[in-house]
Image: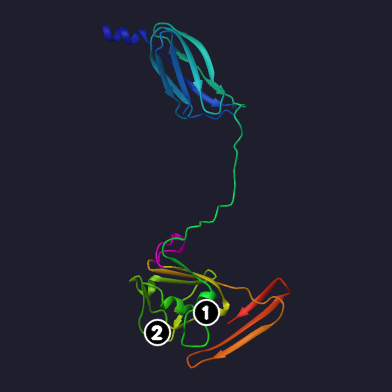
Amino acid sequence: MMPNMVVAQVGSIRGRVVDDEGLPLGGVNVVLRAEDGRLIGTATDEGFYVLSRVLPGVYELSVSFVGFVTITDTISFSFGEAKTKNFTLLEDESVIETVVIESERAANAERPAGLSIVTPRTLNNIPTPGLSRDLAGALTRSGGVVTLGDRGGQLYIRGGAPMQNLFLIDGMRILQPMHILNQFSVFPADILSYADIYAGGFGAYYGGRVAAVVDVNTRNGNKKRFEGSASVSPFIGAVKAEIPIVDDRASLILS
């Protein structure tokens, strides 16, 4: 009989905590502090809370949540008393509003491992069989690159098969860019602005290729006047034309 008598003597309190719009607040701290320092606490679940096994006495009730004004109240319990008490929390106006700080990301001064940057000046220092300079010269002379066969695209980079290489020109994928024993490609130096050659260490931005990525960016054509050139060698012929479309604003470059 004694355990049942003890249970009958304890009280409880339950209720709901909402904001000023009547929406339930989850995770609100509801705490009872007895005069002797004892604490009974819980957190709301979808706005509801229950505190049980409260012994008779006087308690300080505290309802607190980050960003809201804390509510405190004095509440007393008699033997076996069950109370229901709901609360509405108001936003704390002393809490500053959200501050958004924006800035341009600083350029990474450290070059990622495996990245080589090729410019037209770089190609001018690399010998080629023909008169014109070509990105193929830089590719075939890079470390970890093996050429095989006379068909286009037969570059084995870091041990990967040719199909595991990705070639891009201004973001557009190019298939079979290499020609004539891999000494020439569809990337002549006279249309090149720069090329990023990743022999490993590239991110998911480039998809699922595992060997290498060659990301070529072309230069702008002459925006003021028409310009053209042609060249012929024992291996290849080339024609380049730069055509203004809108003066000082847009141009077309053909190669």
Residue 178 is left or right of residue 219, and the answer is: left
Q: Give the residue number, with chain letter if any, for mark 1.
A: 124
Check the image and name the residue furthest to the front. 125
The structure residue drawn at horizontal position 47% and vertical position 91%, both measured from the top left corner, is 235
Residue count near mark 2 (Cα–Cα under 10 Å), binned few <14, some 14–19, many ≥20:
some
Residue where numbered disc 2 is placed: 151
Q: Is residue 205 magenta?
A: yes
* Position in image of residue 104 (x %, y %): 59, 52
* Residue 155 drawn in magenta: no
Q: Identify the amino acid type marked 1.
A: Asn
Whether the residues at callouts 2 and 1 have beta carbons within 8 Å, the answer is: no
Q: Residue furthest right?
A: 247
Q: 202 or 125, which lies in front?
A: 125
Main SS, magenta residues: loop
According to the image, what is the colour scheme of the structure? rainbow
- Would you call the spot at circle 1 few (<14 residues within 10 Å), some (14-19), or many (20 or more)? some
Between residues 148 and 86, which one lies in front from this camera angle? Answer: 148
SS under mark 1: helix
Which portion, as a residue range, is magenta? 199-209
Amino acid marked by disc 2? Arg
Q: Residue at x 51, y 82 (%)?
A: 133
Q: Earlier in the sequence, mark 2 or mark 1?
A: 1
| 193 or 87, nearer to the observer | 193
